[in-house]
Image: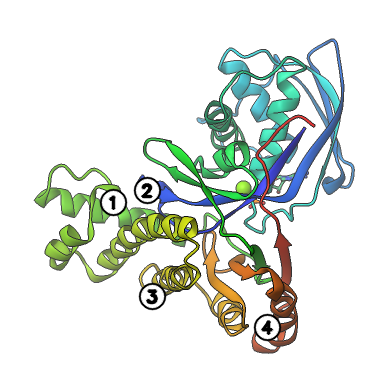
Amino acid sequence: MRAPGRVNLIGDHTDYNDGLVLPAAIDLDTWIGLRRRRDGLVRIASLQAGGETGSFWTDEVEPPDPALPSPARGWVDYVAGVAWSLREAGLPVHGFDGIVDSTIPPGAGLSSSAALELAAALALLGPAPITESSGVLAALAQRAERDYVGVNCGIVDQFAAAECRAGRALLLDCRSLESRHVPLPAGVRVVVCDTGSPREPRTSAYDERRAECGRAVALLAEQVPSISSLRDVDRATLRRHRHLLPDAVARRAEHVVGENDRVVAVADAMAAGDLPRLGQLFAASHESLRSNYEVSCPALDAMVAVAVAVPGVVAARMTGVEFGGCTVNLVREGAVEALARAVADEYPRLTGLVPRVYAVATADGAGNV
Ligand code: ADP
Ligand code: MG
């Protein structure tokens, strides 16, 4: 069982606003090697957890009682949570003895958690061919992470890990869950640069931004009652009513509205092979995340500045949640080495941090191997 990590090419902070995203699965992945059991016991170890073993009976797993203080959750809960959500959905769940191994750096924003969940779903569903759609599997994996592990996550990571295809990005509408594959331009590689500055997901800033988006919707809906999320707002509407919003709230809305447009524009530019346009759109996204959404940081800004100065780097921007983590770059095939060298030489001098560069290939979504 194998499931990939993912990188979001563009569309940041649009998911929880019913908007558009454009992730691609990458060839860093998580594997579960297993021996099937006749009973419903799961015994599982992970090489990333120092070989730590956990076990549970698939018919006994239950999520924590929301009325009680939330218990500490460990990595085995991601697997047990998937067993729970599959069972709740009435799907057959089988026991196994398994070992997890992964090349996805955990917590770097490349979605090791969704990869683990998808690989676990395939392992638990057992030997029969899987008939559930990737959308259904993604929703069940998300439910496991949200309601069992207790992480308030969207569905994008799971959807990407399930549905993406090699050589393509996935344009996903987070409102309708409609998706379409978009080919990457020929001769262009995806390079992920980790700033080495720890990302702090789900910090107060993330909750604050979500609340500010909600505030924008509430104020705009007083003027235009059909608005129920920022997805319903276009640039002209926002311009017309901008003066009614507090400045920070208006800038958050401006980012989300502009970012949805940029996702569509990037998909079009990729299909047309318009590399200069991709550069402009990535730059505009980064600038909007920096100045409108205020979720960049000096390390991310430095990483982007180093990258765009390298000839052959087509596009660079921060990606992920906030204040650290990775940038995503589109790079001409022949320029990947030069980018890696520039990052190794210049970035530590600018920031005092130790970067990592992942020249990835796009990959297929989760599957049995
Ligand atoms: P990411 O951005 O990588 O998804 P998360 O914080 O959402 O970061 O998920 C990371 C968590 O997922 C880890 O702390 C661990 O509990 C679990 N996890 C992911 N991959 C593995 C693995 N290969 N082995 C054990 N646990 C894993
Ligand atoms: Mg995750």
Q: Do the residues bearing badges 2 and 4 touch, measured as CB atoms within 8 Å? A: no
Q: Residues within 10 Å of mark 2 (few under 14, many from 20)?
A: many
Gap between marks 4 and 3 measured at Cα? 22 Å
Give me the C-alpha separation between circle 3 and circle 1.
19 Å
**Residue type pointed to by label 4:** Tyr
Callout 3 crowding tier (Cα within 10 Å): few <14, some 14–19, many ≥20: few
- Name the residue carrying label 3: 291
Q: What number is the disc on residue 19? A: 2
Q: CA distance from mark 2 to mark 1?
A: 8 Å
Q: Indicate which disc, 3 or 1, sits on the residue closer to the N terminus.
A: 1
For label 4, the residue is 347
Mark 3 lies on a secondary structure that is: helix
What label sits on residue 16 in the rendered view? none
x, y (%) of residue 244?
A: 13, 64
Q: Viewer-nearest of labels 2 and 1?
A: 2
Give the image location of residue 89, x and y in percent: 56, 17
